Amino acid sequence: MQPWTARQRVAVIVLTSAIVFVAMARFACNHTYISDPQPVHPLRENELADRIDPNTADAATLSALPLIGDKKAEDIVKYREKYVANHPGQLAFQRPVDLLLIRGIGASTITQLTPYLIFPDQAATKPTEK
């Protein structure tokens, strides 16, 4: 006595074949290779002219940083604009750890971003009083 009927076996074979076909099609169309270990120089490193100040850089410039894409760059700009509106005369990012306030940026991201960022002190950005 067989546990499955002929129609059930055909149905299982068809469903399994369909799943395998869809998986192969997705892999063929959307294959992504992530090297291990990660490359020493990020993919878009040549787009960076020098170190970037996250207090003044636009989203396009920020997105060239390693591990920062378009979405995180836009989030940084939005946070900066909101912070400056609520705290006039203050910088939103005074040191690298301030970027931890942005969703999706963690300690390891900060470690990798630090060589590409510059954080001028507030005294240099404020006008001198006479």
Image (cartoon, rainbow, N blue to C red):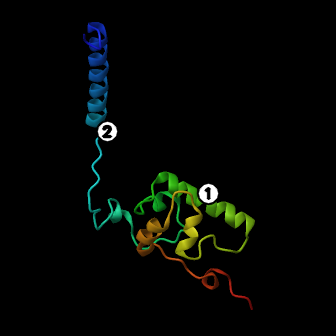
Quarter of the figure with the N terminus: top left
Disc number lying in front (1 or 2) = 2
Tell which of 64 and 130 is nearer to you: 64
Q: Amino acid at mark 1?
A: Lys
Name the disc covering residue 78, or none: 1
Q: Alpha-carbon neighbours of circle 1 within 10 Å: few (<14), some, or many (≥20)?
A: few
Could you tell me residue 45's position as x and y percent? Answer: 34, 64
29 in relation to 73, above or below: above
50 in relation to 101, above or below: below
Name the disc covering residue 66, or none: none
- Local SS, label 1: helix
104 in relation to 11, above or below: below
| Mark 1 vs 2, N-terminal side | 2
- Is residue 55 at all visible to an observer of this figure? no
Q: Alpha-carbon neighbours of circle 2 within 10 Å: few (<14), some, or many (≥20)?
A: few
Q: Residue furthest bottom?
A: 130
- Local SS, label 2: loop
- Is residue 85 at all visible to an observer of this figure? yes
Name the disc covering residue 30, or none: 2
Tell which of 10 and 84 is nearer to you: 10
Quarter of the figure with the C terminus: bottom right
Determine which quarter of the picture holds residue 56: bottom right
Could you tell me residue 117's position as x and y percent? Answer: 47, 73
Q: Amino acid at mark 2?
A: Asn
